[in-house]
Image (tube, coloured by chain):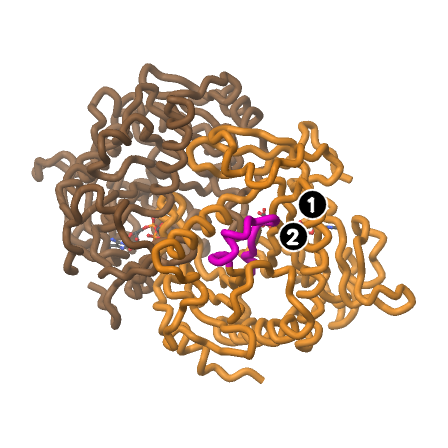
Chain colours: A orange, B brown
Amino acid sequence: MAEASRTTEARRDAVFGRWVVFSPARSRRPNDLKSHNPTNPSPGPGEPRPSCPFCAGRESECAPQIFRVPPDGSLPWRIRVIENLYPALRRDLEPPPAAAPDAEAEEEPGERAVPGFGFHDVVIETPSHDVRLWDLPAEGVRDVLLAYAARVRQLAEHPAVKYVQVFKNHGASAGASMAHSHSQMLGTPFVPPSVTSRLNCMKEVFDRSGNCSLCDFRSKDILISETPNFSAIVPFAASYPFEIWIIPRQHLSYFHEIDQDKALDLGSLLKTMLQKLSKQLNDPPFNFMIHSAPFGLSSSCLPYAHWFLQIVPQLSVIGGFELGSGCYINPVFPEDAAKILRELGCS
Amino acid sequence: MAEASRTTEARRDAVFGRWVVFSPARSRRPNDLKSHNPTNPSPGPGEPRPSCPFCAGRESECAPQIFRVPPDGSLPWRIRVIENLYPALRRDLEPPPAAAPDAEAEEEPGERAVPGFGFHDVVIETPSHDVRLWDLPAEGVRDVLLAYAARVRQLAEHPAVKYVQVFKNHGASAGASMAHSHSQMLGTPFVPPSVTSRLNCMKEVFDRSGNCSLCDFRSKDILISETPNFSAIVPFAASYPFEIWIIPRQHLSYFHEIDQDKALDLGSLLKTMLQKLSKQLNDPPFNFMIHSAPFGLSSSCLPYAHWFLQIVPQLSVIGGFELGSGCYINPVFPEDAAKILRELGCS
Ligand SMILES: Nc1ncnc2c1ncn2[C@@H]1O[C@H](COP(=O)(O)OP(=O)(O)O[C@H]2O[C@H](CO)[C@@H](O)[C@H](O)[C@H]2O)[C@@H](O)[C@H]1O
Ligand SMILES: Nc1ncnc2c1ncn2[C@@H]1O[C@H](COP(=O)(O)OP(=O)(O)O[C@H]2O[C@H](CO)[C@@H](O)[C@H](O)[C@H]2O)[C@@H](O)[C@H]1O
């Protein structure tokens, strides 16, 4: 395990109110994608890569496993949830004392530092190096989503974990250092800044209109596709070209409470959306993020907390305007992107 | 001038409260950096690039000039402030009706769309293609800063402009499409989301402690360098490795009120910091942003609004965790980065 000379720490500043994780050990993680050398002979499809620890048969090169799918060890695994070998937050540090419910609101603002306690896990979505998430059948994508949910439920039991950010990086320009299909989650001892500001914004809308921001969307122009339980849209003010949100049609606050049926429905829609992006944008790098609610939200907040999944293709680099202002410049109107994605056929 | 099939529009969403500028014309702008072909013979240093509209002698290929330094047209120019030829916001659209002072606070939250009115300008920092900002003498950097300030003062006169974001992109991975040294500014008809949340955070600290977040910093550990008027620090919770903030030591809310002396002081410190980053990190791509206050801030807000300049070297790609949570993972502790930068000698 990588050891840091300073202890991992999380700090909040007094200007942006942003939490930052300081993790020197992270810089030692391998970079599978940057070291790809096209002049090296590649193994054939389906064969494990000699250097990839996420491939079947190389489990011993990984950090400890948390669980696998199927659980029965006599069968080959299809999904593995493991510890991240170069964790940004560390499960072996002292957790901050469990705060009283709703203590967040009472908390002193300004600079703060806490030990870098937390959980950083990796979900290996397939044993095969060359299979992408959307190559799996809908049932396979469902099982990945159910693995996320099961792990989030475990982390929710820990009194010091306030939020779990589930996310996927695909492609080097989306930040991925490993090519083998995987996603990650981080259980944090604080509510991250974007979660706080998202809930504040949704609360403001709710307080004035009585409606949840995400139940309320009406326009057919930005709709890509609908299933019994989910809508896929290009959001009204998409920050990125071809950004997609998949939103439960029913008002639900927590992703991790998803059941088998809804997970299959979501798996099938997510697969279709990733296929469409891959086809339309020529296998672009992308990220997806699940936006859920912090654990133990008071019941008065539930009416405006509505979870969703955001997919962001990374087509251009952001610049100083976006970094400084938090405002994005998007060359593609949501209605145009939605029309293109709606009309695109996928096998 | 590039024409869009849809009219440029700015929209705010009801979930993140984020403003996004939709600007189809932006996708047509040239990309000097991506088209650089190392096998093409380069002109010698000091010679204009055949294809660069920012070089001396090619002024006619640029969008209209706003002003130049020196103003006397019989002398060669050293700095030009011009319109952006592919503007994200357009000065020729109908501005939104001027709102009453403090109307922002009263405004209905949730989804909103306004015409994409605004100002998008470029500051050409030197007539020579190969001169970088930190190659200029301190007086040259001062003049660039004074040109920013002069243009911001002009834009502040417009009743519909609420904020001006001044920023610089250097290098392709920091978003720059043009290699010739330049910066930009965007005058927006709304207060951008990061400005709102920064001021809210500073207000919270002020309300509890009676101190301005940026007047209050004490630690010598994060200090890189100090001049009579400015401190350069690595912020306590830096989001990026080797991030630097240059902060006026006196409590000042607006960058654009800077005078000649302070601008020379800032110019010299900015030059040193950019030299240090270039030396330490081998000419990294970077952005810098000036964080000032929205125009017409009520006098009760001034005690906690303190302007500063943020420099962000772009050393790694951000991933889904940062996009989803707004929380960054930084492998370098601020005290360590500050020590390295403090001790680094610069010619
Ligand atoms: N043998 C092994 N066993 C267990 N785990 C192993 C392992 N070998 C490698 N890992 C881990 O696998 C993960 C692979 O993750 P990704 O490719 O999605 O991006 P990474 O986390 O590197 O960084 C991207 O995502 C993060 C979070 O968004 C950003 O901070 C960063 O800038 C961006 O590049 C790494 O976190 C790595 O530590
Ligand atoms: N002849 C001419 N006359 C006048 N102006 C001309 C011109 N030729 C080109 N320009 C303008 O010059 C500017 C150069 O700007 P930069 O290189 O700093 O980055 P750019 O704005 O392209 O995008 C980066 O910064 C923006 C804002 O942060 C991000 O949205 C984007 O993703 C990122 O790549 C462009 O905006 C371009 O429109």
Q: Are marks 2 and 1 in contact (CB under 8 Å)?
A: yes
Q: Label 1 is placed on what type of residue?
A: Phe
Label 2: which secondary element: strand
For ligand 1, tell me if the residue under mark 2 lies within 8 Å: no
Marked residue chain, label 1: A
For residue B88, side relative to residue B72 (left or right): right
Identify the magenta region.
Answer: A288-305
Rendered image quadrant of residue B303: top left
Local crowd size for mark 2, using a 10 Å CA cut-off: few (<14), some (14–19), many (≥20): many
**Marker disc for residue A345:** none
Residue identifier under label 2: A185
Quickly name the residue at label 1: A119
Expressed as whole percent of the image width and height from the top left, the position of residue B121 reads 23, 48
Q: Residues within 10 Å of mark 1 (few under 14, many from 20)?
A: many
Horizontal relation, residue A126 to residue A309: left or right: right
Magenta-colored stretch includes residue A297: yes
Name the residue located 20 percent from the left edge and 23 percent from the top edge: B260
Q: Main secondary structure of the magenta part?
A: loop
- Calculate the distance from the C-alpha at mark 2 to the C-alpha at mark 1: 8 Å
Image quarter of the N terminus of chain B: bottom left
Element carrying mark 1: strand
Q: N-terminal of the two: label 2 or label 1?
A: 1
Q: Which x, y percent locates residue A275?
A: 56, 75
Q: Residue at x 72, y 59 (%)?
A: A150
Type of the residue with mark 2: Met
User: Vertical placement of A340 versus A182: above or below?
Assistant: below
Q: Is residue B147 above or below residue B265?
A: below
